[in-house]
Image (cartoon, helix red, strand yellow):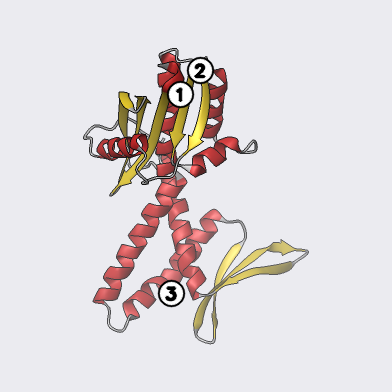
């Protein structure tokens, strides 16, 4: 059995749910499968990593001397082959790969071309997203907060645009004097230096000045209206991170 042991792995996302799965085949016959669902803070990359970890643990615990781990995630394999990748989950995978009694060969396969094991593990990974119970609880990541903030902004923007007359309420909500005042207050809370509002030709600008050196203030950057809207997203995400950290 050991000579023909192939373990296919996959991570999947359906709607906002994430799952992963492994399936072990011997001569194209299924011997074992596992699947698990993640909390909503996950990413497909993290699910792919967890699936490979599960494959390593399965082969090691069953004292398999040689196993092929087959994945359709080229990104994961590139990360594992990069000696400069310092991402903690990648470091962890490299550690258990080298310390296992099993010798592993990691192989990439193209997805959805009819490879039996890959199609099978893909269906299991999708099934994992439908589970009611969450098997892997993850900490909130910056990317999750950023996506949530971006989604909230899009919803609010659309609502205000729908209810506005010629877009005036949207303009005021993002670029009006009250909104810009709130934005400059946020900036002062996160960035050293000072922020002030300018009006160049009727268009709103935010100017960032560094603290004076020898009594001379330095103008570092001016943000135009589109950049101000992007800054809103960044600052909302930072504020959310601070609120989360203060809760623990």
Left or right relative to 176: residue 97: right
Compare residues 221 and 125 and report the one nearer the observer.
Answer: 125
Choose top left, top right, bottom left or bottom right for residue 123.
Answer: top left
- SS at mark 2 in the image: loop
Asked if marks 1 and 2 touch (Cβ < 8 Å), the reply is yes
Which residue is identified by label 1? 56
Which residue is at a point 40% across and 20% down the rendered structure image? 58
Q: Quadrant of the C terminus?
A: top left
Q: Position of residue 65 (x, y in %)?
A: 49, 15
- Closer to the N terminus: mark 2 or mark 3? 2
Q: Residues within 10 Å of mark 2 (few under 14, many from 20)?
A: some
Residues under labels 2 and 3: Cα distance? 60 Å
Left or right relative to 243: residue 31: left
Nearer the camera: disc 1 or disc 2: 2
Q: Residues within 10 Å of mark 1 (few under 14, many from 20)?
A: many
Q: Residues within 10 Å of mark 3 (few under 14, many from 20)?
A: many
Mark sitting on residue 175: 3
Which residue is identified by label 2? 102
Looking at the image, residue 34 lies above or below residue 101: below
Looking at the image, residue 205 lies above or below residue 38: below
- Outermost front residue: 27
Which residue is at a point 53% across and 33% down the rendered structure image? 90
Q: Is residue 122 visible?
A: yes
Looking at the image, residue 182 lies above or below residue 67: below
Q: Position of residue 99 (x, y in %)?
A: 56, 18
- Outermost left residue: 132
Residues under labels 1 and 2: Cα distance? 8 Å
């Amino acid at each position: 059995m050991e000579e023909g042991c192939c373990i296919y792995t996959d991570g999947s996302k359906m709607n906002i749910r994430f799952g992963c799965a492994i399936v072990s085949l011997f001569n194209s016959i299924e011997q074992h499968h596992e699947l698990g669902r993640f909390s909503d803070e996950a990413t497909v990359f993290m699910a792919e990593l967890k699936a490979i970890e599960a494959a390593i643990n399965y082969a090691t615990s069953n004292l398999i001397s040689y196993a092929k781990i087959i994945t359709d995630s080229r990104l994961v394999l590139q990360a594992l082959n990069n000696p400069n990748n310092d991402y903690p989950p990648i470091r962890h995978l490299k550690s258990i790969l080298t310390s296992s009694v099993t010798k592993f060969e990691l192989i990439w396969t193209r997805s959805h071309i009819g490879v039996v094991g890959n199609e099978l593990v893909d269906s299991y990974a999708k099934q994992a997203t439908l589970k009611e119970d969450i098997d892997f609880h993850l900490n909130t990541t910056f990317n999750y907060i950023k996506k949530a903030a971006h989604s909230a902004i899009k919803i609010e923007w659309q609502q205000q645009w729908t209810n506005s007359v010629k877009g005036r309420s949207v303009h005021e909500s993002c670029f009006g004097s009250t909104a810009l005042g709130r934005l400059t207050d946020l900036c002062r809370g996160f960035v050293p230096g000072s922020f002030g509002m300018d009006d160049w030709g009727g268009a709103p600008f935010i100017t960032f000045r560094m603290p004076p050196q020898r009594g001379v203030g330095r103008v570092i950057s001016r943000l135009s209206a589109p950049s101000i809207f992007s800054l809103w997203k960044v600052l909302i995400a930072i504020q959310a991170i601070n609120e989360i950290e203060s809760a623990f």
